[in-house]
Amino acid sequence: MKNILVSGASGIIGYGILRSLRLSGNQYKLIGTTIYSDSAAEGFCDIFEQAIPTNDPNYIDWLLKTIEKHQIDLIIPGIEADMYAWAEHVETLQNTSVKVLLNTKELIEVCHDKWVFYEKLKATNSPFAIDTTLDSDFNTLQTQFGLPLLLKPRVGHGSKGIVKVNSKEEFDKHQQYIGSQLMVQPIVGTDDEEYTTSAFCDGNGGFYAYMTLKRKLSKDGFTEKAEVVALENIEEALHALCQIFQPIGPTNFQFRKDKDGLKLLEINPRISSSTSIRAKFGYNESQMAVDYFLEGKAIEQPVIKKGKAIRYIEDQIIYE
């Protein structure tokens, strides 16, 4: 039996991974970790370990001891903070013989700063790039992008921290942060034309499998409602973007569609936050990751069921 550790098990990605691995029907011992002692994490794993914060100087030592304690075969990050920390210390982790589910270090680094990501994409003359600037002159931006426009954090995830600017008064409140913390973009498409595509990439500019959802976001920036769709030109977009960024393993591409076609909002170099939804429709990227990185198995495009998904509040009961 393989022992698999999933961090951030109290969050939507972490417990989504655990649920997806359970759904696969394969026999794994699942170890879930989170810094919270009072979360629902215990209900999704076989063994629960309370973690110390990722930014604690002793975090990597704690993780190494946990790997040894439970003889872990594969570790999967369920929060972005862990993804970045593990990428920084990947050689140390791999010296334990544990497999680490991470995308390429280069992609993880470039995706950490959305301005750096934009510059790399723009340098290729990609038609999927959204015009982005660090210019902080309101009149110039109004002429270039019109109103409303977006101020987007260079570092962050989901839709947290995004400011929709409708006036100079609103713009002036945030102007000092443009460049160092914020970047500026036009609004592309509408909320009704937002898509999340997860692909399992081969590290050589291609991909083995993919699935697209048309989605509506929750206030926390995660997929709240989704519908399985066949998105026009998505394979062309994935081929082009994989050639540029060379991702490996589970990789999440977020798009909006406007009059010029698909525009790339961002790439998340990890398992998607809608992973548990995807698994229910036949695209179990967590299981694919175990098969590929731990078992060395080939990945093939699964048959995807059609349908819709709605997330709702659910009770998790943990008996003593």
Image: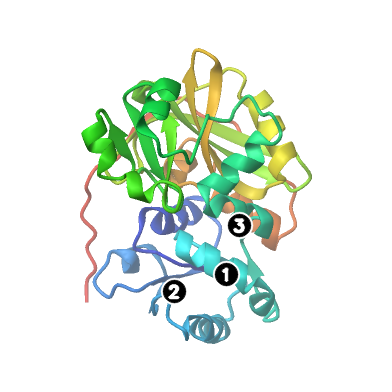
Q: Residues within 10 Å of mark 2 (few under 14, many from 20)?
A: many
Side of 261 where 50 appears, left or right: left
How many marks overall? Answer: 3
Query: In the image, is residue 311 above or below residue 111?
Result: above
Q: Earlier in the sequence, mark 1 or mark 3?
A: 1
Residue sitting farthest toward the top: 259
Ranked by sequence position, the earlier of labels 1 and 2 is: 2
Q: Secondary structure under badge 1? A: helix
The amino acid pointed to by label 1 is Trp
* Residue 268 seen in the current view: no
Q: Nearer the viewer, residue 238 or 150?
A: 150
Report the mark closest to the observer, 2 or 3.
Answer: 3
Q: Depth check: 256 or 3 in front? A: 256
* Quadrant where the N terminus is found in the figure: bottom right
- Pick the front one: 286 or 153: 153
Q: Residue at x 52, y 29 (%)?
A: 131
Amino acid, disc 2: Thr
In the displayed structure, would residue 231 be above or below residue 169? Answer: above
Residue pointed to by mark 1 = 86
* Coordinates of residue 316 in the picture (x, y in percent): 24, 59
Residue type of the residue flagged with mark 3: Glu
Q: Which residue is mark 2?
A: 54
Residue bearing the label numbered 3:
109
**132 relative to 147 in the view: left or right:** right
Q: Mark 1 and mark 2: span between their CA atoms?
A: 10 Å
* Relative image position of residue 108 (x, y in whole percent): 60, 56
